[in-house]
Image (cartoon, helix red, strand yellow):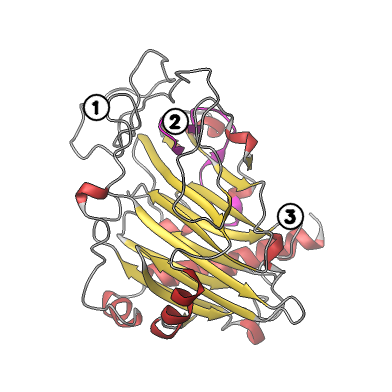
């Protein structure tokens, strides 16, 4: 093992301890740490706005009713497909037309990257698949990431699905827990802009979905930065908005900012996440602002040492087990992250005037 790998493992171990502290704090402290909305959860979208898609043949969204338990097995192409609850696995869809798909029009004229989420296209066109387990990804995680179509696929009604499949009785560690970790081939590319995603997240013990950003590889983690936009674990209906940077040592021990946002129906509906950045090219200084369902939840100044924002990429993944999940493992079945919308824009919906107004409303994250 090289020196760099050794340092990265030590850093990951310390980072994991911070993640556990985020998730294991007592309830009273967590409620007090979220400024501005301590006494209420986000109402979010109303039910009639829940992105139903094509009701006859499209991706139906998470089915709230309990389905009959079935044995896990390889996907069968003749089955209907829908995001199943645990203990039920169904296959990815098949393309229904050879015609060139068109992405539904966005409402933001400044969009400069909107991937065409359609089953006639390969996910690999827009995303790089990270593969394997790599010694638990620094957190003792269980999953093996694959580029197989049962773990990540587009749907006919313009959605991206990441599917984590748990088969605890499988003796083969490479197929016991499988999932997807996707990195955009497109970088942020601009010194200021906005990233928007609308995502239905799985929420269950042992499941850890994340929507986040890292500098393009190769990079030095964590001193070049990590931005977490949508992240939850273990079925806890709380989103953890985080900013991490610096080295894990005594001098840098406070270089983490976190805000916890209760979302009571986190696992039952799409959540809209927005992250905006503006950075001075000459100095590297600038600002970040995060929103959930249109409400500002956290702001931060860009720390010294961060990579230029033009060089950052977006990650989507579902981890399984690991230290953050406190020893819990997912029950047999499949767990879907459904991406309804993903786009990079020159400005957030509402423009930079909205950014300035919400900057003064948002709070700094608590220091870890």
Specify whether 311 is left or right of 54: right
Question: Marks 3 and 1: in contact by CB < 8 Å?
Answer: no
* Label drawn at residue 155: 2
Q: Quadrant of the N terminus?
A: bottom right
**Residue holding disc 1:** 69
Furthest-right residue in this view: 2
Q: Nearer the viewer, residue 229 or 221?
A: 229
Characterize the local packing of mark 2: few (<14), some (14-19) or many (20 or more) Cα atoms within 10 angstroms: many
Q: Position of residue 154 (x, y in %)?
A: 49, 32
Q: Nearer the viewer, residue 295 or 251?
A: 295
Q: Nearer the viewer, mark 2 or mark 1?
A: 2
First reached walking from the N terminus: tag 3 or tag 2: 2
Q: Position of residue 112 (x, y in %)?
A: 60, 53
Q: CA distance from mark 2 to mark 1?
A: 24 Å
| Residue 51 among magenta residues | no
Q: Position of residue 293 (x, y in %)?
A: 34, 62
**Residue holding disc 3:** 217
Examine the image and state in which quarter residue 85 appears.
Answer: top left
Say if 251 sits above or below 261 in the image: below
What span is colored magenta in the figure? Answer: 137-163
First reached walking from the N terminus: tag 1 or tag 3: 1
């Amino acid at each position: 093992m090289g020196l760099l790998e050794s340092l990265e493992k030590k850093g990951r171990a310390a980072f994991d301890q911070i993640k556990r502290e985020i998730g294991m704090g007592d309830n009273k402290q967590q409620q007090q740490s979220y400024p501005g909305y301590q006494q209420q959860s986000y109402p979010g979208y109303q039910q009639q706005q829940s992105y139903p898609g094509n009701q006859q043949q499209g991706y139906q969204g998470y089915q709230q009713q309990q389905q009959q338990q079935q044995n896990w097995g390889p996907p069968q192409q003749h089955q209907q497909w829908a995001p199943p609850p645990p203990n039920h696995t169904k296959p990815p869809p098949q393309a229904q037309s050879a015609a060139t798909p068109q992405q539904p029009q966005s409402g933001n004229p400044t969009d400069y990257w909107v991937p065409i989420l359609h089953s006639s296209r390969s996910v690999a066109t827009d995303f790089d698949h990270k593969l394997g387990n790599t010694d638990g990804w620094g957190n003792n995680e269980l999953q093996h990431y694959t580029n197989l179509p049962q773990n990540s696929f587009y749907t006919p009604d313009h959605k991206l699905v990441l599917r984590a499949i748990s088969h605890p009785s499988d003796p083969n560690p490479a197929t016991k827990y499988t999932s997807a970790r996707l990195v955009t081939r497109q970088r942020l590319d601009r010194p200021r802009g906005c990233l928007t995603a609308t995502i239905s997240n799985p929420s269950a013990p042992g499941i850890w979905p994340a929507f986040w950003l890292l500098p393009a590889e190769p990079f030095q983690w964590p001193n070049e930065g990590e931005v977490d936009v949508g992240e939850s674990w273990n079925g806890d209906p709380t989103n953890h908005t985080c900013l991490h940077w610096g080295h894990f040592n005594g001098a840098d021990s406070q270089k983490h900012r976190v805000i916890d946002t209760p979302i009571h129906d986190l696992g039952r509906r799409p959540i809209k996440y927005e992250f905006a950045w503006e950075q001075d090219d000459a100095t590297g200084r600038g600002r970040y602002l995060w929103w959930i369902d249109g409400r500002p939840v956290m702001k931060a100044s860009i720390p010294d040492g961060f990579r230029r924002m033009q060089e950052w990429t977006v990650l989507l993944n579902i981890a399984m087990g690991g230290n953050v999940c406190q020893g819990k493992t997912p029950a047999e079945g499949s767990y879907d992250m459904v991406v309804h919308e993903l786009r990079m824009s020159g400005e957030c919906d509402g423009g930079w005037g909205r950014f300035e107004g919400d900057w003064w409303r948002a709070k700094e994250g608590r220091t870890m």
